[in-house]
Image (cartoon, rainbow, N blue to C red):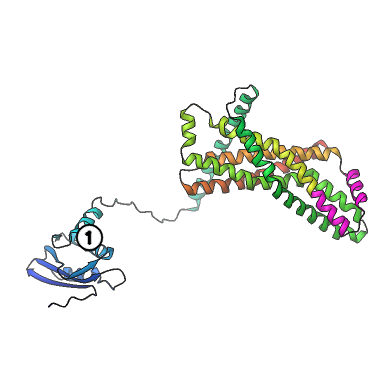
Amino acid sequence: MVNTPEKPELHWNRKEHDNLILRLAGMWRIGKAIPSSEQVKKEIEGSSDLRRISFDTERLLAWDSSLLTFLVQLEKECRDRAIETDREGLPEGVQRLLNLATAVPAKKDARRTSAKESLLRRVGRQVLDFGHGSMEMLAFIGEAFLALLKLMSGRARFRRSDLFLFMQQSGAQALPIVSLISVLVGLILAFIGAVQLALFGAQIYVASLVGISMIRVMGAVMAGVIMAGRTGAAFAAQLGTMTVNEEIDALTTLGISPMEFLVLPRMLALFFMMPLLCIYADLMGVLGGLIVGVYMLDLNFWEYVNQTRATVALSNFWIGLTHAAVFGILIALSGCLRGMQCGRSASAVGLAATSAVVTGIVSIVVATAIITVICDILGV
């Protein structure tokens, strides 16, 4: 009875002067200290007259992909030295897998190279990408403007039910988070102002500070940032998923404009709901300041309310609504643009949502600066 080892072993035996027989024994499995192909390589290098290698697997108990890896490396070494390999002695399953592995040869330079890119090349590529992205953004804004003109003429094609659904999602469903953030912002502004104004005994002007800052700018900005992270990212993810599933291509094939059917109702929904959310955020912010004024500064409730009414002018209210309407359009355009630019993979959807949030917040900050400068020039 022949003792067959479980540990993978490799032996070689010359049958003729130019033929090397490799005897594979034991269990060739991952994690069992498989013999290296370097052993066979040394044997090949020491035989200048070697022309053929065959295999004997009579004592081979079991095998997995480790044996295939060994044989692939061995055949590659033999091809480089013009040595023939005879697979007849291998198990039938090993032969089939080897044929499958070598059916399509690897293309030259198919692997990614890690060559370092020069600084000038990187800067140039970034400039070209920025120019290309700017042109796409301008084209998207132009198409959105044409869709608005079609809406005014009554020729825009979209479902009214979609508009009401988006208004609900970006309006009523956003009230809890807008309430929380706005109250906290009002509390923070009032607390910071109270610390400084208390030094001069002017705690009553906390009402003026909170009222003007919230109603003129901060209410709209905070609502805009919340909607950029909540609704703008949702728009980008929705349109990005439709791009991946080729639904937008199907709409184009059917002769339906994606700009009218998908972008226009989302843009209108945010345009209508952002001013209402801004008013609500203003009230919540003033409420937060009222809590600090009454319970921390010991101000009278009606005294605080009357100071707020006397300080906040109606012009501040209209400026805040203007901010909110502009922010609504910018957030919708940012989310829809990134969704339409989404790639054809699942990871691209996440990147589109992230890019929509960043673009929306940056556009909010830039628009706030521009509106502030215009108001200063106009003396409002």
Specify whether 176 is left or right of 306.
Answer: left
Q: Nearer the viewer, residue 375 or 213?
A: 213
Quadrant (top left, top right, bottom left, bottom right) of the N terminus: bottom left
Q: Position of residue 121 (x, y in %)?
A: 48, 49
Q: Quadrant of residue 371?
A: top right
Q: Position of residue 122 (x, y in %)?
A: 50, 50
The stretch of residues the image draws in magenta is 285-311
Specify whether 43 is left or right of 336.
Answer: left
Q: Position of residue 330 (x, y in %)?
A: 65, 39
**Secondary-structure class at tag 1:** helix
Q: Position of residue 72 (x, y in %)?
A: 24, 61
Is residue 170 covered in magenta? Answer: no
Residue 130 in view: no
| Residue ID at (50%, 53%) | 119
Quadrant (top left, top right, bottom left, bottom right) of the C terminus: top right
Is residue 300 covered in magenta? Answer: yes
Which residue is label 1 attached to? 76
| Residue ID at (75%, 50%) | 182
Residue 147 in view: yes
Disc 1 crowd, CA 10 A, few/some/many (<14, 14-19, 20+): few
Q: Nearer the viewer, residue 238 or 173?
A: 173
- The kind of secondary structure the magenta stretch mainly shows is helix
Amino acid type, residue under disc 1 in the picture:
Lys
| Residue ID at (12%, 62%) | 52
211 lies above or below 314 = below
Specify whether 53 is left or right of 190.
Answer: left
